[in-house]
Image (tube, grey):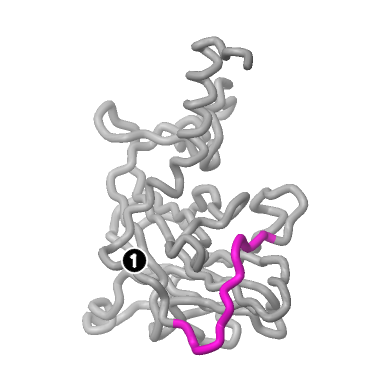
Amino acid sequence: MPRLAAPTVLIACAAFLVAASPAAALDLPAGAGAAPQLPQGVVVAEHPALQTETGQADAGLLAASARSRPKRSGAEKRQHPFWATVNICDTAKSPNALGVRASVPGNGTHQRIFARYTAQWWSAAEQEWLTVAGSGVTGWVPLGTADMLSRQAGWTFRFVQPPAGTTYVMRGVVELQWRGKSARKGRRFDMTRRPGTLRRSQKPKKKKARRSQHAAVVRERTLLTKTGLKGVEGGDPAGLSKAMCLIW
């Protein structure tokens, strides 16, 4: 058996770590790994595939536009200031679809808010929640500035029909970032790089793009989809709010 040179082994290991990092980096709340409570008779399907030929986000995903809500009272502001929920789940209008929607309140600053959406599925064989392969993790999607009361935005994942008699058990995760001006201290990011890809060596041509790439991440938060939330927009049916979605 031929031996690989040390540099080749190091490069291969680095590529593996980069590819695996998005799922491993999810900072989920306690209890997020618990097995779902499923209706009797559900046969869980494994390895859901996004309905796309290239595996790219724009081929298999549909973005929902962000929308600012009107001014709210102090009582409303205290109710679910942050949330993520399933607002679309395998309907006649949206077959084999998982819609993930989040609500983010503003903080009165000019920080820019970004969201990254992840589709996860329950594996009965592995007894754990796994991230959908391919384009199951989006890039960082801009939601606008934090100088507003609140904003909702969402992402819809469409899957290939599961085998007859089986069901995909799905949920969503939303990662949020608040980004400020470039600073020497604080973590910087590259918004041109999708999860699992290497950093581009080319320098951006536009100054505006360079400022966005070098903005410092000043705050982060991860949300897991929950059920029973009010005021959810863009649902199918209207107002739908679920923690999980069964696609069959």
Q: Residue at 53% across / 39% down in the picture?
A: 196
- At which x and y percent is residue 184? 27, 26
Which corner quadrant holds the N terminus? top right
Say if 112 sits above or below 215 in the image. Answer: below
Q: Which structural element holds mark 1?
A: loop
Q: Amino acid at mark 1?
A: Ala
Residue sitting farthest toward the front: 1
Residue 173: image quadrant is bottom left
Residue at 63% over, 13% down: 2
Choose top left, top right, bottom left or bottom right for residue 3: top right
The residue tagged 1 is 32
Q: Badge 1: how crowded within 10 Å, few (<14), some, or many (20+)?
A: few
Q: Is residue 45 magenta?
A: yes
The residue segment tinted magenta is 38-50
Left or right of residue 240, residue 45 in this image? right
Locate the C terminus by quadrant. bottom right
216 versus 240 height, above or below: above
The image position of residue 165, as x and y in percent, is: 68, 81
Res. 203 in view: no
